[in-house]
């Protein structure tokens, strides 16, 4: 029986029809305890989900759905290392990357936690050498610039975390991230670094990714214009699972930091892929980051479903997607340090749950992963919030905010928080026509009546507030792991494999076939008329001026 055929699903569908008529204003007016019942706290974190389209019954029915999908057993299977990545027949053990030293977890008879800590120790050795200046470039100068070359999970996680933890970062090291195959990306970085004081971190789980290998080769060719092959060892390291490909590229495996096939790319910032993060904040900070992830794992593994924050928030996503018909959700951090968090979460969420068939390969009969997007506040307020407040699409929003600033500056942190609170309140409450007229009472009646409809806000727009004490490595670890587990919860309900990414393959294959066809004079393969014409146009064989 598919999840949509269970009594729990059908009860939720019926309940959603009843909830349609209720405004959040009414729910708050009728229930002074609404916040008390619909928020949860763990140390350093408060999650307020009271401004969502829920009642006690909604939550109870969502919990029934979780039980119907066997969520606790599926969670335990992941944490135990069962091969829940069904298509690739792999374990999914990013949680093992954050288990403390001395814990143990056997996978095929091998203690993966011991392996994890051996790599962390190797990282520590190198990271401290670079940070202290003991590791020197080929002209005996200390390292000043770190260039991470990677894409997807080998870029978004480290880039986001290095930025997020900027307050704790070594000031004598500059960090650069090159991901795009667009040569502009590498060229712009090479303009500002020197070969003798730069280390390149080539980050690729598979070490076969076209963009990363092309960029790494470009960096190497640039480096060899000033240095020799023998100098490569001091300036290129790799983070990968593929020792042979690393060697073939010309990096000595002694300068490689390994990880394992049970770490998904978008879950890999906790592994050696986080080397740039460790370089930025030091190993002590990196271990704190891991401990934050482990805090959330422990909560996810042990808290009862109704108190389990990733379970509640993951189920709310399912509620909006499948029962309320909402197809997107926004993440809006009121924290400049989390500038790259929404784009990091896009890969985490959309590459995991943008799936259309169940584990058994049967097309799903319900909607799966929503479109996730967002930007920091208050910037977004001056860009797309108009649509959030008055547009015809309802977008559930996650607001994130720190209680304390990392850079106190006059009254600005309080101004930031006032804006965060105001947005959640305005989205929830809205403004009625009568209230709009009241606000315009100083105007002549005709003018008031003309303008009032434009100043109506429907309200009843759901949001969740995630408030943390201040952004530390540990807090960031908790936040990322929270979202990882939310993604997992949704994938379990939808019975999809959240841990493969076959939807990225077709484009890669076609790009491989198209590459030689872009050479002027080469044969153009079998394509639709649009693609074939574009190939010719890009080859400059069609010189009809644009616009004609
Ligand atoms: O294109 C998808 C993808 O496989 C992502 O899942 C992954 O994070 C990215 O490419 C990079 O892969 P790799 O780390 O193997 O270079």
Image (cartoon, rainbow, N blue to C red):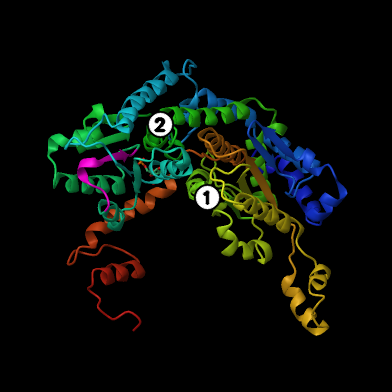
Residue 204, visible in the rendered structure: yes
Measured in 3D between alpha carbons, the distance from the residue under mark 1 to the one under mark 2, in whole angstroms, is: 22 Å
- Dot placed on the residue nearer the N-terminal end, 1 or 2: 2
Q: Nearer the viewer, residue 135 or 357?
A: 135
Asked if the stretch drawn in magenta spans residue 195, the answer is: yes
Quadrant location of the C terminus in the rendered image: bottom left
Against 263, is 48 above or below?
below
Q: Position of residue 502 (x, y in %)?
A: 43, 45
Number of disc labels: 2
Dot 1 surroundings within 10 Å: few (below 14), some, or many (20 or more)? some
- The answer to whether residue 270 is left or right of residue 530 is right
Q: Position of residue 393 (x, y in %)?
A: 65, 62
Q: Nearer the viewer, residue 364 or 258?
A: 258
Dot 2: element: helix
Residue pointed to by mark 2: 282
Q: Which residues are magenta?
A: 192-204
Residue drawn where x is 74% and y is 60% of the image? 459
View extreme (right): residue: 30
Q: Position of residue 239 (x, y in %)?
A: 32, 34
To which quarter of the image does residue 452 belong?
A: bottom right
Residue drawn where x is 49% and y is 32% of the image? 289
Residue 107, visible in the rendered structure: no
Ligand 1, by image quadrant, is: top left
Residue pointed to by mark 1: 336
Asked if the stretch drawn in magenta spans residue 325, the answer is: no
């Amino acid at each position: 029986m598919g999840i949509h055929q269970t009594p729990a699903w059908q009860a939720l569908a019926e309940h959603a029809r009843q909830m349609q008529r209720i405004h959040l204003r009414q729910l708050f007016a009728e229930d002074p305890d609404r916040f008390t019942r619909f928020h949860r706290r763990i140390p350093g974190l408060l999650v307020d989900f009271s401004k969502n389209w829920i009642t006690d019954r909604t939550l109870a029915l969502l919990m029934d759905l979780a039980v119907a999908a066997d969520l606790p057993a599926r969670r335990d299977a992941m944490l135990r290392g069962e091969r829940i990545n069904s298509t690739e027949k792999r374990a999914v053990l990013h949680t093992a990357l954050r288990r403390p030293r001395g814990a143990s977890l056997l996978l095929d008879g091998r203690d993966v936690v011991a392996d994890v800590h051996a790599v962390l120790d190797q990282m520590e050795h190198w990271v401290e050498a670079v940070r202290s200046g003991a590791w020197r470039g080929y002209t005996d100068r200390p390292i000043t610039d770190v260039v991470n070359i990677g894409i997807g999970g080998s870029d978004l996680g480290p880039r986001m975390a290095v930025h997020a933890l900027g307050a704790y970062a070594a000031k004598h090291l500059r960090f650069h991230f090159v991901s795009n195959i667009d040569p502009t990306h590498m060229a712009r970085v090479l303009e500002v670094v020197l070969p003798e004081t730069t280390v390149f971190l080539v980050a690729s789980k598979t070490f076969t990714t076209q963009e990363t290998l092309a960029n790494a080769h470009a960096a190497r060719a640039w480096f060899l214009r000033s240095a020799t092959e023998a100098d490569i060892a001091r300036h290129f390291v790799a983070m990968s699972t593929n020792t042979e490909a690393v060697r073939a590229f010309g990096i000595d495996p002694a300068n490689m930091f390994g990880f394992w096939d049970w770490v998904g790319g978008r879950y890999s910032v906790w592994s050696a892929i986080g080397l740039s993060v460790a370089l930025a904040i030091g190993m002590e900070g990196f271990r704190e980051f891991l401990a934050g992830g482990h805090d959330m794992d422990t909560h996810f593994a042990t808290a009862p479903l109704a108190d389990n924050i990733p379970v509640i928030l993951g189920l709310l996503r399912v509620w909006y997607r499948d029962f309320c018909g909402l197809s997107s959700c926004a993440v809006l951090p009121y924290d400049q340090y989390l500038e790259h968090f929404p784009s990091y979460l896009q890969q985490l969420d959309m590459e995991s749950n943008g799936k259309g068939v169940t584990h058994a390969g049967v097309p799903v009969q319900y909607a799966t992963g929503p479109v996730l997007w967002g930007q920091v506040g208050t910037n977004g307020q001056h860009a797309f919030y108009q649509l959030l407040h008055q547009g015809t699409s309802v977008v559930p929003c996650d607001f994130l905010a720190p209680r304390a600033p990392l850079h106190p500056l006059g009254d600005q942190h309080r101004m930031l928080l006032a804006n965060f609170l105001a947005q959640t309140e305005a989205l929830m409450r809205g403004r009625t026509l009568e209230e709009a007229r009241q606000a315009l009472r100083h105007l002549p009646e005709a003018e008031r009546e003309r303008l009032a409809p434009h100043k109506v806000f429907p309200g009843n727009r759901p949001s969740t507030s995630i408030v943390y004490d201040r952004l530390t490595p540990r807090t960031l670890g908790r936040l990322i792991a929270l979202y990882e587990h939310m993604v997992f919860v949704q994938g379990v309900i939808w019975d999809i494999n959240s841990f493969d990414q076959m939807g990225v393959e077709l484009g890669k294959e076609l790009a491989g076939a198209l590459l030689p066809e872009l050479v002027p004079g080469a044969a153009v393969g079998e394509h639709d008329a649009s693609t074939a014409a574009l190939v010719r146009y890009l080859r400059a064989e069609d010189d009809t001026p644009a616009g004609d």
